[in-house]
Image (cartoon, rainbow, N blue to C red):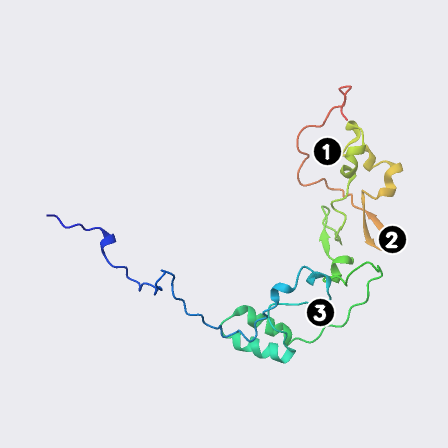
Amino acid sequence: QQQSTSPLRARPAFQQPLVDRYGFPLQQLRTPKHGKDWDERHHLGGSENELKPRGKRQYFSAPQSLEELKTSLAGDATGRLAARDILRNLERAELPKTKRPPITADSGAPLVPGRHAFGGSMHDRDGKRRAWNDRWHVGTSLLNDNCHPDHRSYFTQRSLFESSASQEWRRFGHQEVAHGVWQPIATRRPARFPPLGAPLKGRSGTPV
C-alpha cells in the first residue's frame, strides 16, 4: 500500500492557539507601554477640530512642552531622519514676525512672501535681461469664448485685438516691471518655434 505524501498530514510548524471548552481562543490581554500617554478620548473630538485655533486643538498624543519635545526627538534622532530634521528646525532662531496682511479676510500671512512681489529675471529673444513676466499666461485667448471665430487667438496666429489700440488697456502685450510701470514684451527676433499648423481662413475664404 502506497503511503500518502499530502502536506496536510504533517503537523503545522507553528504552535496552535489555546482554546476553551467552547472552541474560542484564549488570548492574553496586554497593556501597551504607551498606555499612559495615549488619549483614550481621541474618538470624542468630533469634526470641530478644524474650527479651533491651533493651540486649542485635540491630538492623539499628549501635549508636550518645547523642552520635552526636544528630548523626545533627540532619543529618536539616532535612527529616524525625520526626527533629526524636526529637531534641527527647532534649534533655529525664531523668524521675525510678518506684517499683518491688509486684507482682513485673510486667515494668515503668506508662507512665501516673495511669491507675491516682483522678483526674478530672464533673457528675452534679443538676449536682453529683463524682469520675470508674471503675466506670461495672460493673452487674448482668455476672451476667445466672447470673440468671433475670425477674431480669436489660436496657436497658428494671433488675434487682431492684441495690437488694437482699443484693447491696449488690457495689457496683453505688456509686462509689469514695477507697480504701475509697464513695458512691451515684443522682441525684434521672432519666436524660436514657428506657429503650429497653417493659418486659418474665415468664412469668406480669406485668411483671418
- Disc 2 marks which amino acid? Gly
Where does label 3 land, which residue? 56
Look at mark 2 in the image and give the residue it sits on: 180
Quadrant where the C terminus is found in the figure: top right
Residue 96 vertical placement versus 143 (above, below): below
SS assignment at label 2:
loop
Of pointers 1 and 3, the one earlier in the residue sequence: 3
Query: Looking at the picture, which amino acid does disc 3 mark?
Result: Lys
Do tag 3 and tag 2 residues touch (Cβ < 8 Å)?
no
Percent across and percent down for residue 18 are 34, 65
Furthest residue to the front?
Answer: 21
Nearer-the-camera pick, 110 or 142: 110
Q: Position of residue 170 (x, y in %)?
A: 85, 42
- Tell me which amino acid carries mark 1: Tyr
Please name the residue shown 56% across and 77% down the image: 72
Task: Say which of 46 and 51 sits in front.
Answer: 46
Residue bearing the label numbered 1: 154
Residue 40 in view, yes or no: yes
Q: Quadrant of residue 12?
A: bottom left
| Identity of the residue furthest to the left in this view | 1
CA gap between label 1 and label 3 equals 54 Å
Q: Secondary structure at mark 3?
A: helix
Q: Spatial distance from mark 2 to mark 1, Cα to Cα?
A: 29 Å
Image-based side of 51 in relation to 171, left or right: left
